Amino acid sequence: MSVVTWEKKDRTAVISMNNGANTQNLIFAQELNRCLDEAIEDTEITAIVLTSTDPKSFSQGVDVQWMGGAFADGKLDDIKGFMYGMNDVFKKLLTLPVPTIAAINGHAFGNGAILSCACDFRFMRADRGYFCFPEVDLGIPFLPGMLAFVKKAFAYDQFHDLYLTGRRAGAAELAERNMLVKASDTPETLMEDALAFAATFAKKRSIFGIHKARDHKQILDVMEAEDKEVIESLALFVTD
């Protein structure tokens, strides 16, 4: 099975990450981009739900073992390809002319948490899983574009708390902070809730796309102007 697949449920595209902890590497970025492209090509699709088939994890962030090996082997173009590929994923989630909904069914750490923030809406199961930005403890600065779009998911003081402490938050807390549409009781009700919410959208793509593009213009400008310099320099870690 591919690390990312998608299926059509009525007028909703359900994109599933299928690789256990769903750590992110070059192949993951390529497959997620492919599924987003294929889903939006179906003109009947009116919403996209992003989730995981793993019972414990939504996505636990960057595949550090893969990245460390790529650095050791001098495969710097692969690392850049991964970074640009994930930025393409983020841009698509920010601009696709249909709502994008993260159904967070388990742990969302680092780039996994960031991925959910690129979506328009978020649901999370309440009985298991944590949301966390551990980058402050790992010495990994957010890209400028990541900072810009993650802030749209939170009130600033609430993001500031999680961003600088690196602590874990559960679904109940995130729902109270209005970062989630809903904290769902179980993984089953999570998908029921996300799909029911997705089914409420039957907007014309033309207006929905314009709304999202204009709403996120400043974020996209930051991604275009500032992320490339960081990616090309591969200044991805702070070691002192």
Image (spheres, rainbow, N blue to C red):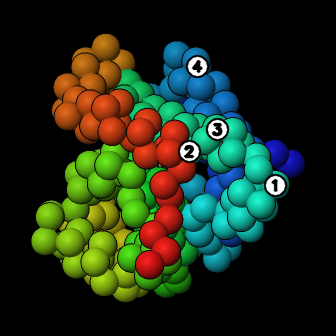
Q: Nearer the viewer, residue 68 or 239?
A: 239
Q: Where does residue 207 sit, x and y in percent of width and height?
A: 25, 18
Decide: marks 2, 3 in contact (CB < 8 A)?
yes
Task: Answer few, some or many: residues within 10 Å of disc 1's Cα (few below 14, many 20 plus, some between 14 and 19).
Answer: few
Residue corresponding to mark 4? 42
Residue 86 figure quarter: top right
Q: Say which amino acid is labelled 3.
A: Gly
Rounded to the nearest whole Å, what is the CA distance between mark 4 and mark 1? 40 Å
Decide: marks 4, 2 in contact (CB < 8 A)?
no
Q: Nearer the viewer, residue 28 or 177?
A: 28
Task: Answer few, some or many: residues within 10 Å of disc 2's Cα (few below 14, many 20 plus, some between 14 and 19).
Answer: many
Earlier in the chain: of badge 1 and badge 2, it is 1
Q: Say which amino acid is labelled 4.
A: Asp
Rounded to the nearest whole Å, what is the CA distance between mark 2 and mark 3? 6 Å
Can you tell which mark lies on residue 81? Answer: 3
Q: Say which amino acid is labelled 2.
A: Met
Task: Answer few, some or many: residues within 10 Å of disc 3's Cα (few below 14, many 20 plus, some between 14 and 19).
Answer: some
Earlier in the chain: of badge 1 and badge 3, it is 1
Residue corresponding to mark 1? 73
Earlier in the chain: of badge 4 and badge 1, it is 4
Q: Say which amino acid is labelled 1.
A: Asp
Decide: marks 1, 3 in contact (CB < 8 A)?
no
- Judge left or right: residue 127 versus residue 150: right
- Judge left or right: residue 61 versus residue 144: right
Q: Nearer the viewer, residue 34 or 16?
A: 34
Q: Is residue 54 above or below residue 78?
A: below
- Judge left or right: residue 37 versus residue 7: left
